[in-house]
């Protein structure tokens, strides 16, 4: 068994690794004593994307580049990655929690016959054993799990693990192992559309503004979008708002939506049901605005305003504009 900690690269599908990789690489480097290696399955890696991985701490980059690897299909990726694991025997395989890696890491672990700790919020070495901490029961409890054998496979919740300072100018060490992509007969994705809101991506954002049933209708999300564009936040929603058809499902925060851990979460007209909290309770600072002083969200909020969001949101937006000189 080797000693390297592999980090499966999540990219923006345009040749650039996502910034969450800085967190995964830093954590892998901390646990392995600097042996964090990136593994990038892609149809095209931009040269400055490789540089960024090195600057974020990748001591080596295993670049598996082929048009046959895009778009992502587990049937194509898993055998390619599993063959490389067999040849190189990493000690651990880590990746960020994203829709793609949720599936990929679980399938890879199953293929390798090893355990998978999903959605971890802490990793520590106990002697020569890795111990992962992960939330269970919608975030009510934390459980500690470990593995019977290596490689240890785990997904890391974004914005929980600290990214180290980048090392500018660190040259990437790139290995291009030969590999064959099996004929994956299954075509699941026929067309992919990129929809840009002009705002940061929900799971990557440092600031998130979120709206619930208290918004009363889809047209009212515009006030949250104005606030978000002033402070540079992403806009999320509760399931009640999504089920009502006010926002697409990709904006849903919670147990059956996205898990976020931004530096600041601002919730408007959201009651704070346990299933919503499951997706945002690890936010660093939580601010809640609700007209009901008994709303459960106030129990976990760091700051709360009991008031009508239709008055509070425009007032906050004006104050932020003044503060930020916009
Ligand atoms: C299996 C399962 C999975 C689920 N998964 C999720 C999930 O992933 N995400 C999720 O969010 N939910 C999820 N839910 C649903 C969850 O239980 C709640 O029903 C939902 O979160 C409620 O959304 P809400 O807070 O927007 O609405 P409500 O609970 O109706 O709350 C609306 C709040 O707005 C306040 N309000 C109203 N008007 C104003 C105003 N003018 N100004 C200020 N405040 C106002 C009210 O006081 C109230 O507190 C799940 C449920 C189940 C059973």
Image: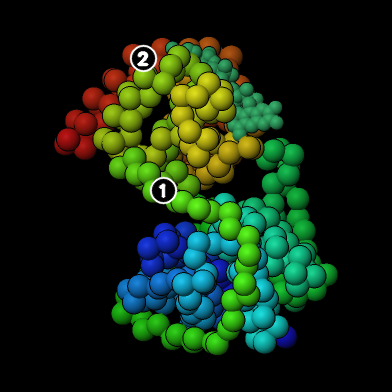
Q: Quadrant of the C terminus?
A: top left
Ligand 1 found in image quarter? top right
Q: Nearer the viewer, residue 105 or 57?
A: 105
Q: Specify the quadrant that holds the N terminus.
A: bottom right
Q: Which residue is mark 2?
A: 310
Residue furthest to the left = 325
Could you tell me residue 306's position as x and y percent? Answer: 46, 15
Residue 75: mark in rendering: none
SS state under label 2: helix
For residue 235, above or below residue 306: below
Query: Considering the numbered disc 1 on the image, is that residue within a helix, a strand or a loop?
Result: loop
Q: Residue at x 45, y 14 (%)?
A: 216
Q: Which residue is mark 1?
A: 193
Residue 301 image position (x, y, % from top left):
53, 29
Q: CA distance from mark 1 to mark 2?
A: 33 Å
Residue found at x 80% / y 73%: 149
Q: Position of residue 80 (x, y in %)?
A: 62, 76
Residue 62 appears in the rendering:
yes
Q: Nearer the viewer, mark 1 or mark 2?
A: 1
**Quick check: 53 above or below 23?**
below
Residue at screen point 42% across, 65% down: 17
First along the sequence among labels 1 and 2: 1
Does the closest atom of ligand 1 sit within 8 Å of the Cβ of label 1?
A: no
- Residue beneath the point at 37% across and 19% down: 220
Q: Which residue is most to the front? A: 185
Q: Residues within 10 Å of mark 1 (few under 14, many from 20)?
A: few
Does the Cβ of the disc 2 residue fall within 8 Å of ligand 1?
A: yes
């Amino acid at each position: 068994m080797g000693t390297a900690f592999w980090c499966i690269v999540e990219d923006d599908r345009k040749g650039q690794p996502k910034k969450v990789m800085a967190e995964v690489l830093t954590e892998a480097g901390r646990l392995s004593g600097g042996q964090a290696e990136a593994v990038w399955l892609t149809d095209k890696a931009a040269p400055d994307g490789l540089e960024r991985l090195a600057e974020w701490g990748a001591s080596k980059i295993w670049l598996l580049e082929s048009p046959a690897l895009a778009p992502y299909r587990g049937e194509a990726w898993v055998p390619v990655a599993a063959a490389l694991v067999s040849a190189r025997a990493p000690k651990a395989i880590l990746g960020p929690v994203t829709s793609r890696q949720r599936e990929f890491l679980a399938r890879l672990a199953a293929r390798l016959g090893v355990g998978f700790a999903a959605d971890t919020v802490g990793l520590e070495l106990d002697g020569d054993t890795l111990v992962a901490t992960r939330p269970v029961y919608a975030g009510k409890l934390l459980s500690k799990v470990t593995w019977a054998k290596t490689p240890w496979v785990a997904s890391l919740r974004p914005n929980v693990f600290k990214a180290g300072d980048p090392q500018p100018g660190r040259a990437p060490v790139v290995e291009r192992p030969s590999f064959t992509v099996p004929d994956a007969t299954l075509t699941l994705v026929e067309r992919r559309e990129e929809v840009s809101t002009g705002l940061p991506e929900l799971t990557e954002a440092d600031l998130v503004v979120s709206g619930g049933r208290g918004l009363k209708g889809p047209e009212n999300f515009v006030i949250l979008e104005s606030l978000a564009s002033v402070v540079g936040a992403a806009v999320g929603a509760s399931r009640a708002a999504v089920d009502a058809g006010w926002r697409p499902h990709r904006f849903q925060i919670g147990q059956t939506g996205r898990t976020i851990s931004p530096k600041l979460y601002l919730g408007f007209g959201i009651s704070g049901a346990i299933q919503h909290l499951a997706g945002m309770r690890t936010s660093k600072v939580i601010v809640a605005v609700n007209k009901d002083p008994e709303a459960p969200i106030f129990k976990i909020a760091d700051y709360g305003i009991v008031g009508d969001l239709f008055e509070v949101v425009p007032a906050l937006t004006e104050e932020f504009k003044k503060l930020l000189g916009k």
